[in-house]
Image: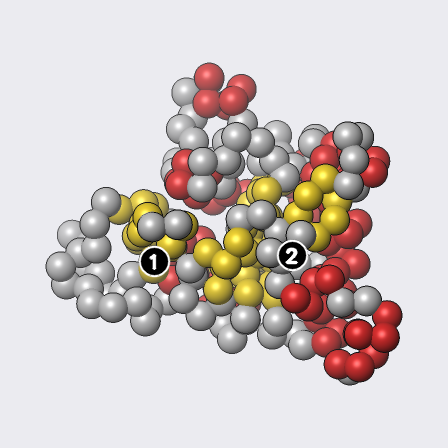
Amino acid sequence: QVRFKSLSVVVMSTNVRYFVNGHLTKDAPSSVAGNNGPWAEQMLGGTLIKDGSLKSTAEVLGGKKYVALFFAGKWCPWCRALEPKLQETYKKVQGLDPNDTEIVLLSCDNDQAAFDEWFGQQPWAAAPYEVAQGENGKAPIGYVRKAKRDAGKPQGTLGEHFKLASVPQLIVLDGATGTVVTDKPMEQAGTKSDQGYNWTDLAPETWSLRGAEVEARL
């Protein structure tokens, strides 16, 4: 029997969805009132990888203004095209305020080795590969590619919830409540992946600061 102590709520338009231990539930359990619990642990699991080691999700994401879920894989040219801009933005924002934004990679790489190689070059957090892709008897929470779904693996709970049809995707959440701030923080700068991405007006304000604006906030 599972006892619910708290609940996470994700809001997109007028739809409300509840996550418990990384999995969607149809309705809020009757024993739960309000949305003041550890939504991040319930959505992403109890541990994340950060700075080369497993840490509690609460430690990694506690106090963050924004949490950006980054659905991506090294095999994807558009994902690789987004990464440099994301790294530049992350470094800038961390310099302004370490609690402004944390990014969490939910890998859709082909295997653990590919994930380890690509994530090893990234400064942000990640869900363990087995959690994102549902390995070792776990149910996936990330985006599962069609080839794996055709082989019998279900779509991940977050991939299903956000109706992800491709990667990369960035879903920006409010760090305090887990509600969606925007699912459209970026747009392609051109028709080819090597042209990269730009941030849209829906992205967090700090992501688009440049030059003198950054200096003024330091």
Query: Which label lies toward us, 2 or 1?
Result: 2
Q: Where in the figure is residue 74, as x and y percent of width and height?
A: 70, 36
| Dot 1 alpha-carbon crowd within 10 angstroms: few under 14, some 14 to 19, many 20 or more | many
**In the image, residue 92 above or below residue 16:** below
Q: Earlier in the sequence, mark 2 or mark 1?
A: 1
| Residue under pointer 2 | 201
Q: In the picture provided, is 197 more to the left or to the right than 166?
A: right
Q: Position of residue 23 (x, y in %)?
A: 34, 46
Amino acid found under the numbered disc labelled 2: Asp
Kind of residue at disc 1: Val
Residue visible at 58% across and 47% down in the picture? 184
Q: Which residue does the image show at 68% across and 68% down from the upper left?
A: 206
From what the image shows, is residue 13 above or below residue 67? above
Horizontal placement of 126 versus 187: left or right?
left
Tell me which corner region of the image, top left, top right, bottom left or bottom right, holds residue 28.
bottom left
Q: Nearer the viewer, residue 174 or 149?
A: 174
User: Which numbered tag is attached to residue 9?
Assistant: 1
Q: Nearer the viewer, residue 166 or 114?
A: 166
Name the spot of residue 144 as percent of width and height, x first.
50, 31
Residue 124 placement (x, y as % from top left)? 66, 59
| Secondary structure category for the residue under label 2 | loop
Give the residue furthest to the top.
Answer: 150
